[in-house]
Image (spheres, helix red, strand yellow):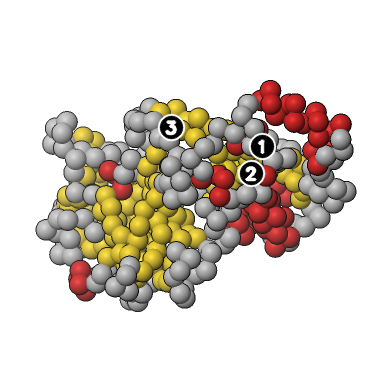
Amino acid sequence: MATVKTKSLTFTLDPSFKGPCSLTLGFVPDAPETFESMHPVAWKVFEIKGNNSQTVVWNDNLAGCRATVDKSYVVTAHEYISIPPGHFSNLSLDKSTPTEPLYTFSPPEPFGGDRNTQVRVGSVTKTTTEEFGTGFVITDDDNKETMEPVLTTDALQHGETVYINYIPQLKVWVDLNYKQAEILDKSVKKKQVVWEADLSKLKDSRVQIWIKRDPSGDIKGTTDSLITLQHQTVTPQGLNCPCIQAIYTANLTFVLPGLVGDGLRAIIDNLSNMAYTATKTVYKGYDTEATLTLSLPPSKNCNQAEQDMIRAIGNACVYGQAFIKAHSGAICLTINNGRETWMEINPASPQWFDTVSYYSSDLKTLAFDGVADAEAFAVQVDVAQTSGGRRGGRRGANDVA
């Protein structure tokens, strides 16, 4: 079974951008059937403002579905099936069921040879006319599958088929008057695209897109990679280096095991409104503990992330029911042939509280509080503890352990 490729796109307003910004995301393949027999759908519609960010996730688990379109041209996916490129599936209808008619897709079968990249969907429903959609299958934090349609076809009668050349050419527009999942009309071809990419060709697993105004006043999206998967060694080169990623990790304890799942989701929702991206969540079975790792925006440091974590716990209505048991931070120094090298950020060092030094070109002393190596750091710690320095007892009674 082929590995599913996933791309995570995070949209953030540039600090100089004035006012909120509404974004519409849609997949518009460069194909003659687009806007003719194949109609793009508004995949995501959302507003970002201030320091808030919005993250969307795409993958290449291609699927076809039976779709319906309401009076407002909003598309709803119903029965669906994953269909790899070069395969076909037919939709059939069984009216003999005692309740609602039963629609089913046949198991995908190959067609057209090994190099075929098309998907074919057919209708064998005998008496009905059906609309079809294509998109991809996602799995949420509860392991629940859903399909997100991004294209829809004209209605097919019994015996008709449609061939889909699915190219994930994502376009982003500003201030369009569409609802999420609404069919886009040809007028979007005349609208300014602020960012666009073929997601299948991106070499990054996570991409930061900054929405800003250029000197002429036009709105543009600029891209920074959060994790670079190119086969090369990357060395940080300053504050705007696109390859740097800093993370903050909190080990959380809840008063009851039943609070862990819902509590974590509520905390993550609150943190996403503060421009954080949750990169990893680790559960420990039916237990009261969990680990949450956050990717830090360039304007945040580990100490700020911890304070925001405490705020998120309070906002999620679990204050007094969840606690930070332990914490850590790290920064990605290099990625070489997919192998990442990380350095821990010492919580007792100024770097824990300092944002700029995360992006300094001289990162070798980051873990050792400004001294060159571990031996010098140990000597400095010993001196500080002997003289009653700040490392001898930094945390107060109300500080997080």
| Residue situated in front as seen by the camera: 205 or 114 | 205
Q: Position of residue 205 (x, y in %)?
A: 40, 42
Query: Which residue is drawn at the image coordinates 28% and 57% (left, top)?
Result: 196
Mark 3 burial class by Cα count in 10 Å: few <14, some 14-19, many 20+: many
Three-letter code for the amino acid on which mark 2 is drawn? Gln
Q: Amino acid at mark 3?
A: Ile
Pick whichever of labels 2 and 3 is earlier in the sequence: 3
Q: CA distance from mark 2 to mark 3?
A: 22 Å
Q: Secondary structure at mark 2?
A: helix
Q: Are discs 1 and 2 less than 8 Å apart at CB? A: yes
Residue position for label 1:
369
- The tag earlier along the polypeptide, 1 or 2, is 2
Give the CA separation, mark 3 to mark 1: 23 Å
Percent of width and height locating residue 366: 60, 37
Q: Residue furthest top?
A: 375
User: Circle 1 — which element?
Assistant: loop
Tell which circle, 3 or 1, labels the residue nearer the N-terminal end: 3
Q: Residues within 10 Å of mark 1 (few under 14, many from 20)?
A: many
- Residue type highlighted by circle 1: Asp
Q: Find numbered disc 3 in the image and state the secondary structure of the residue it sits on.
A: strand
Residue identifier under label 2: 351
